[in-house]
Each structure stands twice: as C-alpha cells, then as structure tokens.
Amino acid sequence: MDKIKSTSILLKGIRVYTENEIIENGYIKIKDNLIDEIGTTDRLGSIEDYEVLEIPSGYHVVPGFIDVHIHGVNGADTMDATKEALDTMVTALPKEGTTSFLATTITQEAEEIEKAIKNAGEYIEMQSGQGKAEILGIHLEGPFVNAKKAGAQPIQHIIDPNLELFKQWQALAKGTIKLVTLAPERPGGLEMVRYLKENGVIPSIGHTDATFEQVSEAIDAGANHVTHLYNQMRGLHHREPGVVGAAFLRDELKAEMIVDGVHVHPEMVNLAYKQKKSKGLLLITDSMRAKCLKNGTYDLGGQEVIVQDGKAVLGDGTLAGSILKLGHAVKNVLQYTGCTISEVIEMASVNPAKQLNVYNRKGSLAAGKDADIVILDDQMNVYMTFCRGEVAFNKEEEA
C-alpha cells in the first residue's frame, strides 16, 4: 500500500462498528480530519476527490482506543517532564490502536510532579493531534494515596489529600488534570472527592485500604471511578466487601482493569466482566517506559524496575506498572471473557470517552466525530490506525 497523502480518504468494503450497528461491506468517508459519512457500499455516492483504500474483507473497523492510565512507552515517561518524552508517547501509541490518552504521573516529591504537569499542560495546549495520539489531559496518580497500598508508588512521597496543593497544581497544569487517583479514607479525602466532582475532574478510588462503607461515602461525595481494579486496594472478603465488593455492587463506579494476564488472573477478569458487564469496565495499560523495549532495568518514579518476560517488577517483586499494549488487552479480554467485539469497543473506547466527557467527538464511529479509527485484521491485530483523519500507523509500511 502506497503512503496515504490525501485529507479526503474513503475506507471501502469494510465491516464497520458504529454506535448502533455493525455494517457489513460498509464504507467510511474521512474529510478534514473528521468522519464525514458512514454507510453501505451499495449506497456510496460520488468518490471523486477521495483517496480510496480497499481494506481486506474480514477486517474490523472500530473507534480508536482511549487509555486513561498510561505512564510511558518506548523509553519515555510522563514524569520525564520534557516535550521529547510526550512526542515519543504520541507517536508510539497509535501502533497499539491508542488514539488518545491521559498522560499519567506517579507519586514523587512535589517539585517533580509540578515539572511533569506543567510540561504536559503546555504540550496539550500546543498539540495538533493530527497523525498522532492526542493527549486529552493528565491523570494524577498519587501522591494522595494510602501508604498501606502503595504498590510501586514511592512510599516516602505519599501525602494525605491536600486540596490547596491540588488547586495550585491544576492551575500549573492549565486546568488539564482530568482524573485523580486518591484514597478517600485518608484525612481530606472526601473533601477532595467533592471538590473534584464539582469541578469536572474524575475522582478515582485507588491505592486505597477503604472499607465498603468508606467507598460508599466516597460515592455519595461524587467518586465514580476505580483505578486498576483488584490491584493495590482492599480486596473482596465475605465479612468486609472492601473496594472490590463496592466496585462490583455499585453501578456508579466505572472500573479500570489491566488485562495482561499478570496483574489480574484471567478468571478474575471474567468475574469482573460478569459483575460489571462491558458498560462498567475500562481497559487500561498502566504501562511504563519499558513498553516496546527489550528486557532490562528501567526507571519508574525514581525506582529501579526489572523487566523480564512480560513482567515489570521492583527489586522486592512488587508489580511496577505493565508493558501491556492496549491492542493486546483487547485481544486478551475477548479470550478471557468470550465477550463480543462491540463489548470490547465499549471497554476500550466508549466508556473512557464518556468518563472524560469527550463522547461528543471521540469514542465511537459517527459522522461529525474525530476520525480516530482503528482497523483490526482477522486475528484482531492492529493493522492501521488513523488519528484525527491521518494515518498514524500502517502495519504494511512498518513491515
């Protein structure tokens, strides 16, 4: 396939997953970075001025994936606090079908977090988004978490939720912090949850030892999200349902999940799917800079991380983020749960877009929305990715 040059592109002879139906032998017209028209090929009108791409039959055309929890990829990390690091991330992520994401921080000393969020805020303001993944905002993971459930969050920098500090950080980030992971049971936790909810930021329960009752209080205060379900939270117990029990029972909570077969056992992925259904789950990677690189020793939040055979761990064996690609998470969840492709689209595209309040322009294939499109081959591998109407990844060119 020759390099695609046009801004008006026609994808033809494809299986299109729209908001309401699956169109066999369909087409999508892309114009000026937006989806212009979707329909069946037999009703296709004039194709003059369009560059036509014939896609092999049996391939699936789905909305771009949105990763609300990713630290890094290909040697770069949000905490590097450089334009070059974010350039690397927005260029690398379309290869796994990710067309937009939240640049995610980690618990560190205040000065390091401030550098990272200032850098990301400035980058978001300047980005064009075309032909590269778009940064939709910042996910502040820590430092407002519970040291008992630190995981790979550096324990010496964990602090209780501090609303004044958050307000300073949000100003520094030019209002781009869209999601905050915090432990609601810590002093100041509920106050912060209320403030975030009132100000259009997602309050997410994570790295937390909260009881079922404390999670219920957080939901009443406005919490509607759970950071990496199962990992670093009070688990399910028959006398104390914990955070996991609350996630299963309360529909207000959407739950992220790292479906790499390492962080969560495949059967527990299936259990969450049966409890929350596809409407209640978001696929995330929580990946760190070693993703796309070989085995070795890397840095995460100033800590040494050993990456070996698909696993990233601290020296003591604690899991330290993942090297999962979102496209692989999509394949894994299909295998582990037996869910449909339409349900996977809910978990990887629709739900994150709705949580972030960008469903008017992302998260589904519909006329007028950003042309963030992923083509999956008959084995569900990412074959081609469009970011805002421009080809950001083409498997044939890479090969």
Image: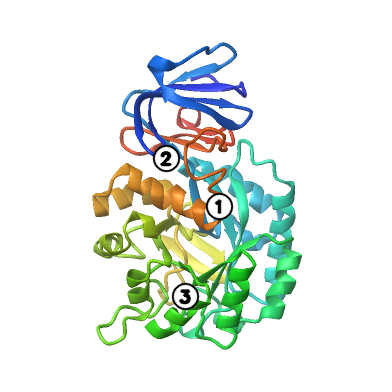
- Residue beneath the point at 46% across and 52% down: 294
- Inter-mark Cα distance, 1 to 2: 21 Å
Chain-order first, disc 1 or disc 3: 1
- Inter-mark Cα distance, 2 to 3: 29 Å
Q: Amino acid at mark 3?
A: Ile
Q: Which residue is mark 2?
A: 19
Q: Looking at the image, what colour scheme do you see?
A: rainbow
Q: Is residue 245 above or below residue 50?
A: below
- All told, the count of numbered labels is 3
> In front of the other: label 1 or label 3?
3
Residue 239: x and y in percent read 27, 87
Nearer to the camera, 156 or 377: 377
Q: Amino acid at mark 2?
A: Glu
- Inter-mark Cα distance, 1 to 3: 25 Å
Q: Which residue is mark 1?
A: 101
Q: Which mark is residue 344?
A: none
Chain-order first, disc 1 or disc 2: 2
